[in-house]
Image: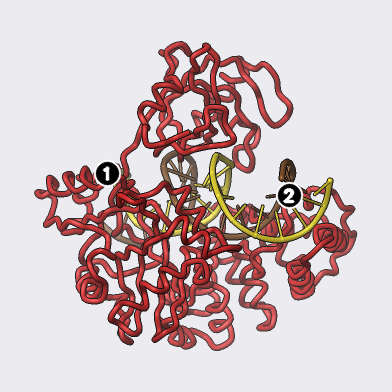
Chain colours: A red, B yellow, C brown
Amino acid sequence: MLLTRLAEVSREVAATAARSRKTALLAELFRETDPDDVPVVIPYLAGRLPQGRLGVGWKVLSRPVTPAAEPSLTVRGVDARLTELGRVSGPGSQAERARIVGELMGAATADEQRFLLGLITGEVRQGALDAVAVEGLAQATGADPAAVRRAVMLAGSLQTVAEALLADGPAALDRFRLTVGRPVLPMLAHTASSVAEAVQKLGGCAVEEKLDGIRVQVHRDGDTVRIFTRTLDDITDRLPEVTSAARELRGDRFILDGEVISFDGDGRPRSFQETAGRVGSRTDVAKAAREVPVSPVFFDVLSVDGHDLLDLPFADRHAELARLVPEPMRVRRALVSGPDDTTAAEEFLAATLARGHEGVVVKALDAPYSAGRRGASWLKVKPVHTLDLVVLAAEWGHGRRTGRLSNLHLGARDTDGTFAMLGKTFKGMTDAMLEWQTARLKELEVSDDGWVVTVRPELVVEIAYDGLQRSTRYPAGVTLRFARVVRYREDKRPEEADTVETLLAAHPEVQR
DNA sequence: TTCCGACAGTGGGGTCGCAAT
DNA sequence: ATTGCGACCCCACTATCGGAA
């Protein structure tokens, strides 16, 4: 298959708003795909590269290359070149990668260049990624979409399911079963604004502490232990103490779901930054493990001794978990019978926060384990802080925000009357707010370099955030975690904005 | 007819590790 | 040694489609 055909379909998909039409377009292409092209066509149309990391970013890709007049690239040819590209390493590799990219782009038409650029940078922007590709795949093969989704969850990848499905039809889906040693996509939580709201939605539920660490899926088969992240990367080699802990459990074959986190000498959780830095360390794991030891804390079990537990209600899975994993290695929890019983949940949240954790996850006791964002039987609740800050500048948006000022630079008042930048945010804005802030900030403009519009620090905005973290980037030595806009405060003058001093006082746990 | 679940888009900060300077 | 940059951790929120209620 020619790449130009994919570029064409991608353009058509991007041009239609209707999800049903997007699905139909993808299904049509999947039907005409040669089996040998499937391993490439499927991920490409889901907006992903089969190679994953390539070591090429915007710096290399932004160099303009004269496009070819006629399409000649084949899908498999491009894939082979990109595989080659990903294998380049050692001294001079950056230049070599740039050379290969230039060559590839030179052989591509303008249309193909756009498509390749989107693929490599991960910004396909066609309004259809994995989930819509799954629908298209189901439609192309006559398979049940739910069965395809489940197979993708079990395989941990769309690509392998697509290959099997397009080669052998819907019957191939039965081949995908939960297997110890092969990671499955993890179940994720949605957000609720209060435990009362969460309990109201879920009825009988467990309220569990939410630890601010790294999500892990731990597989053990006899002496073999494998540890996977949320995105199914294998990080076994970085976490020897988790491997040891898994080996000490009484079961012989199991899959556990949990969080890895570091505690200090008093049993208080260390900051996310410390835990994440430890888990990210690969070069001297022994040293990292001595300095920042981590502990696994489990909250679910997917398989035990050959029994697939995915479809059991959470209450039953937890009973198995409690049999397998001793209490200190499980998250703390409280049981709530229903909406009339929120006091216990509120108290548990308060106690969890007092122990230094970030919040709770409320989980329906009758829900099976299901991956992806589908379903809302897990609801996280975290406290939200707010501040009144001053807009110092704003950046021009991209994609659907092109032509609107989007990413705000936020400042708090400093002791000398100036404003110290604390971070940026693009979150929480409605289209109307984007429109309004673009006009308002243009009135306050001091300069515009085409990327950042600097403004007089006069506009006050209420910002919600999850907490403070240390920063080497910003002058106050701290930055906001997950900052988002709540509303503009035109009733407030910049002199009434919050100060760096009060912010730091509100978060004594953060040492600069 | 209205409501709501699911999805994609729009990016944020930090840390690590590799390659280049 | 330091700097640049890509990968991968954590993540919130809005707009929109389309099926459920």
Earlier residue among tags 2 and 1 = 2
Q: Position of residue A399 (x, y in %)?
A: 63, 43
Q: Position of residue A334 (x, y in %)?
A: 17, 56
The disc numbered 2 marks a residue on which chain?
A: A
Q: Secondary structure at mark 2?
A: helix
Is residue A152 among the parts visible in the rendering?
Answer: yes
Left or right of A240? Residue A385 is left
Q: Amino acid at mark 1?
A: Leu
In this rendering, the answer to whether A36 lies above or below A67 is below
In which quadrant of the rendered view does residue A423 lie? top right
In which quadrant of the rendered view does residue A488 lie? top left
Left or right of A338? Residue A392 is right
Residue at 34% in and 48% down:
A191
The disc numbered 1 marks a residue on which chain?
A: A
Question: Which of the numbered marks, if any, corresponds to residue A58?
Answer: 2
Residue at 30% in and 57% down:
A378
Question: Which of the numbered marks, if any, corresponds to residue A353?
Answer: 1
Dots 2, 1 in contact, CB < 8 A: no
Task: Report the label total.
Answer: 2
Foreground residue, A106 or A137?
A106
Measure the C-alpha gap from mark 2 to mark 1: 41 Å
Left or right of A327? Residue A114 is right
Crowdedness of circle 2 by 10 Å Cα count: few (<14), some, many (20+)?
A: few
Q: Position of residue A271 (x, y in %)?
A: 42, 46
Q: Which residue is outermost to the left?
A: A340
Left or right of A208? Residue A32 is right
Q: Amino acid at mark 2?
A: Trp
Crowdedness of circle 1 by 10 Å Cα count: few (<14), some, many (20+)?
A: some
Foreground residue, A392 or A472?
A472
